[in-house]
Amino acid sequence: MSNKFLLIANAYPTDDNIYRNGFIHRRVKAYVDRGYQVQVFYLHPHFYNYDSYEFDGITVFKGNREHYENFLETHNYDNYLIHFVNPDMYYPIVNIKENPNITIWIHGFEAENWHRRWFNFLDSKKELLKVLDQAENYFPNQLKFLNKLYKEENINIKFVHVSNWFKENIADIDAKVSPDNYVVIPNIVDGKLFNYVEKTPDKRLKILSIRPFASKKYANDQSVKAVQALSKAPFFDQLEFHFYGDGVLFDSVLEPIKKFENVFINRGFLLQDEISNLHDEFGIFLCPTRLDSQGVSMCEAMSSGLVPISSNNTAIPEYVTHNVTGLLARSEDPHDLAYQIERLFFNPELFKNLSKNTASSIRNIADENVVISKELDVIMNGL
């Protein structure tokens, strides 16, 4: 069995930063648990010294392109797995290795044009100037590279997308080509950690939001406006809203609702087991969005049986079926978000059904056994 893998990524967890591309580490551990040998090369242009470390039992090498090329000259693997692909990751493999087997995951920002995140530049001149510079110096070159990569016929390459929506509406369009050698496989949702326990009807009164506040893509402002809309309802005092997260927008976005006694604001990031424990206390996961290729935190909440209330846009409908496994509000419509919460307040039976359905559905789509089996089949056997 060709079971020796090298995974190349632009970031990887360390003991000091366990969040950095943690979803990639979860894959690595799953491959190892199934008997495969996996090592990681953490490639970054600002690493001036070649080094290595161990994280959670996985050997991680780190260095810049020169170190990476030297490493490939002296190490052989059966399969090369690339996350957040760029030219520095790809070309050394095909230039040094003969007939390499390569699997490339397309996650998001590395495959989209600058204007896709327009909402981040509306209020910040600094961010606008930064992205305009990237529009000239980064995005055209990266997208030309992807165009060439998608059309490559002489190298054994397989592409993995996490949603059909992102592939068809972003990646293919921005690279101006649609490859045939691809498969859609979502990111893993750990059903053991985010285990389903049947929700009692009173849990629908407790609404949870765990989101970064570093970008407007997470639409936290929409959640805040939904709370403001509900504050005028006679049943508002029976609801509880708990917001967790951090980022440059944290204070300014949440300021309008700090005055409400039933709104609880918690600054900081949470470990996975802390999130799982929180899920037990809540019944609704409030997670509107402006751009998502999957929405992993939403899927984890679904696995725990929280009813997701999100936006009917981007890839979300691939993971949530409105009125069956969750509720989807119209984009940029906080009053519709509030209405979906109101629906569950007045219909505990709907809440119970959605909670049960959503936990079952996401396991069929993104449980570790489902995802890893599909990925290993692609890596080992092709498409």
Image: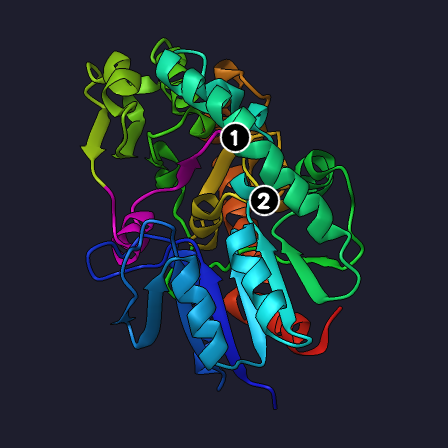
Q: Which residues are magenta?
A: 269-290
Q: Image check: 70 left or right of 113?
A: left
Residue type, label 2: Thr
Residue type, label 1: Asn
Q: Nearer the viewer, residue 211 or 85?
A: 85
Q: Nearer the viewer, residue 239 or 311?
A: 311
Q: Which mark is residue 117?
A: none
Query: Where, quadrant-wise, is the C terminus in this rendering?
Result: bottom right
Any magenta on residue 331? no
Q: Which mark is residue 137?
A: 1
Q: Residue at x 56, y 55 (%)?
A: 362
Q: Which tag, 2 or 1, sits closer to the chain's start? A: 1
Q: Quadrant of residue 120?
A: top left
Q: Image check: 171 left or right of 301?
A: right
Q: Which mark is residue 325?
A: 2
Q: Residue at x 27, y 30 (%)?
A: 247
Query: Where, quadrant-wise, is the N terminus in this rendering?
Result: bottom right
